[in-house]
Structure formats: C-alpha cells, structure tokens
Amino acid sequence: MSDPTESWEAWWLLQGGLFRRPYINPLQHDFRVLSRLAPVFQAPAPMHSADRTEGFIRHWGVVPIDELGEQNVPVIDEQQGIVYSRADPERVRWCDSTRCHRSIDLANGEVWEVARCVVPRWAAGTLERVATFLSAQPLDEQGAPDGAPFVTNIDTPLCIQPTHPTLGESLDFEWLLRVHGGPTPAPLVAAPFQSVPVSDPPDGLPFQWSDWRYQWQGRYSVDHKSILSSTIVRLFARVAVATPTRWQVNVGGILTVWYQAVNPYDNEVARQGVITR
C-alpha cells in the first residue's frame, strides 16, 4: 500500500487545507469578476424574505424584481429549450391606460382625468403615446340633436373648435399633461381647474395644449420616447362652455408608458432598454 501522504489530497489535508479553504463569494458579490459581468447581471439575486427587503434596498440601491409586481413564472421555449422568466431584469414592461367619460356634466365640472400610468419605483420609464378624443353633439332647447356632431379622428384639423350651429358659441377645451411623484391620488372627475396638480413638463412634450396635435389615430400621438423623471403620469381634459345644457360631450384619452428595472451599476442600460427595446 502506498503512503497516503504521497497523494496531493492527503498533503492538502495534512496542511490544514480543509480549514484554510477560503470563503467562496457568490459570483455577483466577488469584486474581482463583478466588473467583467454584463451590467444587467451585476445586481444581486432577488431576495424573497420580507424582513430582508429593506436592507437589500439600502445596500444595493434597488428593489428585488418581484417587488415590481411580477411573479417569477418560467416560460419554456420548446424549440430552443431556453427558459425565460417574467422576472428577468432586462424585461421591458408597459402601461396602456385609457378612460372614457360619456355625457360629462358641463354645468358642475371643468376637468376630467382621462388616462393615468404609474411607473414603479426603481424603474426607468418613457412616455410613448399620448392620444386625445372628444365628441361634441350640439343640442336644441328640447335636448334633441341640433346639427352634425363633432368627432376627433385622424383627419381632424389642428386648430378647429366645435361650434354650436344655433347659438354660435364655441366649446372651450384644453388638454393637460402632468408628471409628478408622491402618493397616488384619486382620479379627477368633474373637478375645478385648481385641482389639477402642478408639475414640471415631461421631457420634450408640452405641459398643456388647446389643439388637436395628438388626436385619436393621429400620426404624432406615438413614438415620443419622453424619459420620465417622476412616477405618475396623468392626462386631463378641461372642457367649458357658456350654455352647458345645449351640449352633449364625451372625452377620453390614452397614455402608453414603457419601463424597465433600474440597474444600480449602470442606469443607462435601463434607459436604453425603454427607448430602443
């Protein structure tokens, strides 16, 4: 029988190798390889323990992907044999919000919220689409239609204003786009103009306008790629008229926002993801 000390394993054990073995860091915690990884993989793996979430955020500056409201559900590509995950940090998510207000009460209100999107914390978002819709039916004294209705569509002239054929009065309208933070408020319905929040204008887009540049199905309503600086995006319609009982008005709007989880080591990765996809 050969001397066990002649083997490399025996020599390593005799030298205390079992006790000297260095602690092996997880790959994402090893500073020697961290800088060589793709940016999206440099964040630590999600933690599922509720009592450790706050410490996770304070240390790394990000929240686990599961906190963004997505479940870690695997999806298997049978042809390529690849497993994808809904909680993939590179996955781009979106909000497509619309709300229609029919036969609005012009006598008791002025502002209606027609769309809203909320970008989760620890995410970068872009506002892609803004679309507005308004239909106005002039009425006679008995409440019956008085003339043709005004309805916005792809061919609506930019500066046209709905006008009552009998009274000659025009419908005063305006669209308000707001981007702000803080708690999520209740929607504004038949509210005074003073209820609209004050905020900075979104990146490259107007703060408010009184024309049809973003009319429903219009070519300028998409592909804005406006980077958002706050979490809540809201679109309002302000409608006012001198004789409310002589109009039947419907308003609506659409907001589409794309967003992606922020990487603590390279925020530009998330920005590029939501811009270029």
Image: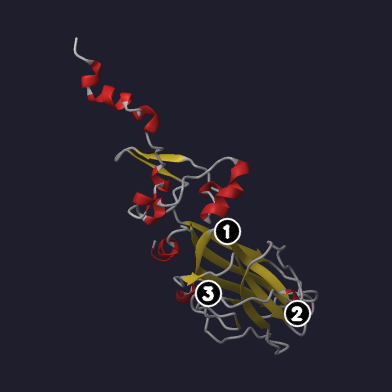
Q: CA distance from mark 1 to mark 3?
A: 35 Å
Q: Residue sitting at 38 percent across and 44 percent down? A: 27
What residue would you read off at disc 1? 121
Residue located at (23% from left, 25% from top): 8
> In whole angstroms, how far apart are the C-alphas of marks 2 and 3?
23 Å
Q: Quadrant of the N terminus?
A: top left
Classify 222 as above or below 158: above
The location of residue 204, given as percent across then percent down, is 50, 78
The one of 168 and 188 positioned closer to us in this rendering: 188
Estimate how packed mark 2 is, as few (under 14), some (14 to 19) or many (20 or more) residues with alpha carbons within 10 Å. Answer: many
Badge 3 marks a residue whose secondary structure is loop
Q: For mark 2, what is the residue?
A: 246
Q: Given contact means CB atoms under 8 Å apart, are the residues at marks 2 and 3 in contact?
A: no
From the image, tell me which residue sits under label 3. Answer: 153
Foreground residue among 40 and 129: 40
Q: Amino acid at mark 3?
A: Asn
**Residue 207 shows up from this direction:** yes
What is the three-letter code of the residue carrying label 2? Arg
Q: Position of residue 11 (x, y in %)?
A: 27, 25
Precedes in sequence: disc 1 or disc 3: 1
* Identity, as a three-letter code, of the amino acid under mark 1: Arg
